[in-house]
Amino acid sequence: MTTVEPPRAFGPGLGVRLERDSQAAAHARRMVRTFLGGLPRAVPRETAEAVMLVVSELVTNVVRHARGRLCSLDLEDMGHGVGISVSDDDPDPPRPRHLDLTGRGGFGWPLVRRLSSELTVLSRPDGKTVHAVVSF
C-alpha cells in the first residue's frame, strides 16, 4: 500500500503522505480525481487533465530522483486554480535533464513548467517542496 497516512482535509484542500514506490503516482492521481470531484464548482476538463499531469510528473520525479522513503502531496482550491505541493526529504532541487527519446526521460520538468501558471521550489536542509499552480 502506498498511503502512509489516510488523506487529510485542511481548509479548502486535501493532503496525503505517500511511500516512494511504484504505486505512488497512481495513488496521487486517484487523490486528484477525488479532490477535483469534491470542489464546489466544475473544473474544466483541460484544467483537470493538466492538474493530473503535473501531480503525476512531480510524484514520479520524487520516486525516481529523490532520497528518503516518503513524500507528501497537498492539493488546495485557490479560487483561481489548483495549488499543488509535493514535498520530499531530499534538499536538492529538480534539475532539467536533456530530453532522451530512447525512453530515459527528461520530459517531466519542462511539462510541469509549461502547464503551471506558478512554479516555485523551496529547499530546506531536511528536504524540499515543489509548489505549482494550475489556473482555471
Image (cartoon, rainbow, N blue to C red):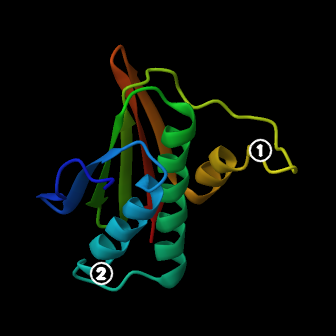
Query: At 47% from the left edge and 65% from the top edge, which residue is drawn?
Result: 51
Q: Position of residue 83 (x, y in %)?
A: 36, 55
Q: Position of residue 93 (x, y in %)?
A: 53, 26
Query: At 51% from the left edge and 58% from the top edge, which residue is drawn?
Result: 56
Q: Earlier in the sequence, mark 2 or mark 1?
A: 2
Q: Contact (CB < 8 A) between labels 2 and 1? A: no
Q: Where is residue 47 in the image (x, y as percent from the top left)?
A: 49, 73
Q: Is residue 17 above or below residue 128?
A: below
- State the residue in front, 48 or 70: 70
Identify the residue under disc 2. Answer: 37
- State the residue in front, 7 or 76: 7
Left of 56 or right of it: where is 43?
left
Name the secondary structure under disc 1: loop
Left of 14 or right of it: where is 82?
right
Query: At 81% from the left edge and 36% from the top edge, which residue is drawn?
Result: 98
**Residue type (three-letter) at the residue carrying disc 1:** Arg
Name the secondary structure under disc 2: helix
Q: Quadrant of the N terminus?
A: bottom left
**Residue type (three-letter) at the residue carrying disc 2:** Gly
Query: At 32% from the left edge and 47% from the top edge, which residue is drawn?
Result: 18
Residue 104 tag number: 1
Q: Mark 2 to mark 1: distance in Å?
A: 33 Å
Q: In which quarter of the image is the C terminus?
A: bottom left
Q: Mark 2 packing: few (<14 Cα in 10 Å), some, or many (20+)?
A: few
Q: Is residue 48 above or below residue 74?
A: below
Give the mark toward the camera: 2 or 1: 1
Q: In this view, does 24 lie above or below 72?
A: below
Q: Residue 131, located in which quarter of the rendered image?
A: top left
